[in-house]
Each structure stands twice: as C-alpha cells, then as structure tokens.
Image (cartoon, rainbow, N blue to C red):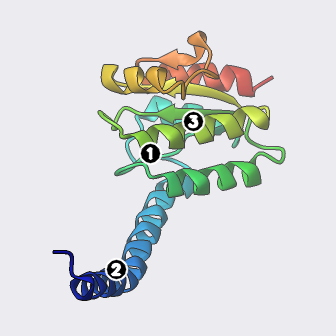
Amino acid sequence: MFDLRNLRGDLLGGITTGIIALPLALAFVKRLADAQMEGFRGETPAALEAQEKALLDASGGRVLLPDFVGPLSFSAASDLVHLMRERARGEVRAVVLDLTRKPFMDASAVRAVETIVGEAEAQGIEVFLAGASEEVSRLLREMQADREIEADHRFAQRLPALQAALTVAGR
C-alpha cells in the first residue's frame, strides 16, 4: 500500500538536499569558468611555438587565439563570447579555435563552440578551426555546430590556421 507519510519525508529530504547542493554546484561551475577564462584573457597561450607566437604578435590583436585549458563549459564559452564582443570593437578580425588539446567533447562543449562561432560570425569575425580530432570533428558535424566554418578555414595544425587568420586579419 502507498504511504503518503514516507513520500512527504522523502520529498522534504530531497528538497533539503537540493537547497544545500545547489549553491555548491553553482560555485563549482563559476570556479571552473573563471579558471578557463584565465587562458582566454592571456595575450599568448603558453604552448605556442616561436613561429606561432611571432604570427600572433604580428597580428596586432586582430587575431584571437583562446587557450582552451581543461574542459570547455558552456559558461566559459559565454564568457569568451563576451570577451570577443569587447575586443571586436575595432581589434579582432579572426579567431582561431585550437582544439588540439581537446581529444573529445561532450554535447555542452560542442554547443559552446557553436555559440562562439555564431557570435563571431555575427560580428564579422572569421573563424578558423585547428587541430580537431576525428571524434571532435564528427561531433561538431553531427550537431551542426561547425556549419558556419568554411572548409578552407579548417586545419589539422595550429600554425597554418594562424597563417590563414593573419592573412584575413591583415585586410
């Protein structure tokens, strides 16, 4: 037989747990996004070769190369979109999404890429994709998150992507 007294206790326990857990979860998401944004704000990602750094420096701020460190969350993508809006007011002409250190992504990360690409396109910023693994490329394609990235804007490695971005940004 169904006992409403136990249901009420279970419901109150669930609500109490939710009230306690929600602020902790939100704090974790905020800390993760803040950590990811540290890589986005830096002028030069840490893992650049000398030639790549020289190209990025030569762009004079017209090429943005976010440093994707750790998991890519939707929250961090939103922060990156905000950063692109701020810097696009006369500076950024191209963004290189280097996914070399992202051997796999989940659906939220793919949607984050889609958000970045869509916002960049809306601002007239050309998007270049570099280093996407076969699995990441397949996910982007299946979820149609990369439909705005032209075929000649996709590169297996970061250096040719930066070279192409600099050519576009120099116009």
For label 1, the SS is helix
Q: Residue 86: image x %, image y %? A: 75, 55
Looking at the image, the residue that sits furthest to the left is: 1
The quarter of the picture where the C terminus appears is top right
Q: Residues within 10 Å of mark 2 (few under 14, many from 20)?
A: few
Q: Which comes sooner in the sequence, label 2 or label 1?
A: 2
Q: Residue 150: image x %, image y %? A: 62, 15
Q: Residue 99: image x %, image y %? A: 41, 33
Question: Considering only vertical position in the picture, is 2 above or below 111?
Answer: below
Residue shown at the point (48%, 61%) measured from the top left: 38
16 or 153, nearer to the observer: 16
Work out how far the residue at label 3 is from the one at label 2, CA to CA, in angstroms. Answer: 30 Å
The quarter of the picture where the N terminus appears is bottom left
Q: On the image, which quarter does residue 88 sit in?
A: top right
- Amino acid type, callout 3: Glu
Q: Which residue is mark 2?
A: 21
Residue 78 in view (yes/no): yes
Mark carried by residue 77? none
Q: Which residue is mark 3?
A: 114
Mark carried by residue 108? 1
- Amino acid type, callout 2: Ala
